[in-house]
Amino acid sequence: MKVALVEDNDAYRQTLARLLSRAPDCQCVGQFATAEAALAELPALRPDVVLMDINLPGMNGVECVRRLKQQLPATQVVMLTAYEDTDNIFNALAAGATGYLLKRTSGAEVLAALREVMAGGSPMTAHIARKVVQSFQRPPAAPADPAANLSPREQEVLDLLAQGLIYKEIADRLGVSYETVHTYIRRIYEKLQVRTRTEAVAKFLRR
């Protein structure tokens, strides 16, 4: 398989190149220290797999993956990085990366991951795979309370609306003018993004 490297650490890039040179089924077709250099030359090289760092100088690895996949949709990209936070994982995968390995992954595991990619798999270290699974197991966020942004007085006005009181009755109950009640209700409609009393009360009752 033809493999290209995009890694700004010269020593680590050379280590990967030597690893590939010793593997009978791998050929290192290109080495790049920046995303910009990689994007300029990879279309002509047409590698099967690209091993790419995320924290590159200039354009970051995630954006590089996104652009590379537009140019070479069939090329697989495996992120090889020191980062293991969930945001980096999902940003890379969403951009089109096929796998995500940590830089402390052994050489044998890197080669195994490349072969897994070519066989149609999505290699990830156990720690990364667990983070992915855990992210899908999180309970969904509770829907926002539509009345949460209302002031205490606006909530009181809305409660009286829900009880069926008209504007004058609300004004009398609260000891304010009719115009003040009208202002409160206009603000309630704006905050709840409704246009009628019925819609406002419906949102209030669904809390």
Image (tube, rainbow, N blue to C red):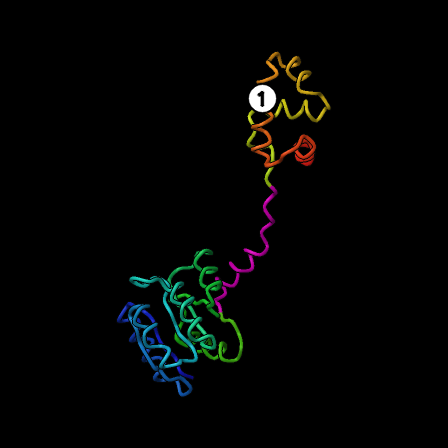
**Label 1 packing within 10 angstroms: few (<14), some (14-19), many (20+):** few
Q: Nearer the viewer, residue 169 or 102?
A: 169
Q: Give the camera-side residue of 9 and 104.
A: 9
Can the viewer see residue 104 in this picture?
no
Residue 179 x/y as whole percent = 58, 18
Give the residues drawn in magenta, as a range: 124-143
Q: On the rendered image, what quadrant is the C terminus found in?
A: top right
User: Which residue appears at 40% of the width and 81% of the height?
Assistant: 46
Q: Eyeballing the image, is 24 above or below 69?
A: below
Instruction: Look at 35% across and 62% down and name the residue there.
Output: 60
Q: Main secondary structure of the magenta part?
A: helix
Q: Secondary structure at mark 1?
A: helix
Is 202 covered by the magenta stretch? no
Q: Residue at x 42, y 86 (%)?
A: 25
Relative image position of residue 109 (x, y in whole percent): 44, 74
* Image-quadrant location for residue 50: bottom left
In the shown orientation, is residue 203 left or right of residue 191?
A: right
Q: Residue furthest bottom?
A: 24
Can you see residue 9?
yes
For the residue pair 2 and 101, the one nearer the viewer reads as 2
Q: Which residue is mark 1?
A: 153
Q: Is residue 162 above or below residue 206?
A: above
Rendered-image quadrant of the N terminus: bottom left
User: Picture coordinates of residue 79 (x, y %)?
Assistant: 41, 68
Looking at the rendered structure, the number of numbered marks drawn on it comes to 1
Task: Name the residue type under label 1.
Answer: Arg
In the image: residue 59, left or right of residue 174: left
Location of residue 31 by image quarter: bottom left
- Residue 117, horizontal then vertical, whole percent: 49, 76
- Residue 7, by quadrant, is bottom left
| Whether residue 95 is situated above or below residue 76 in the rendered picture | above
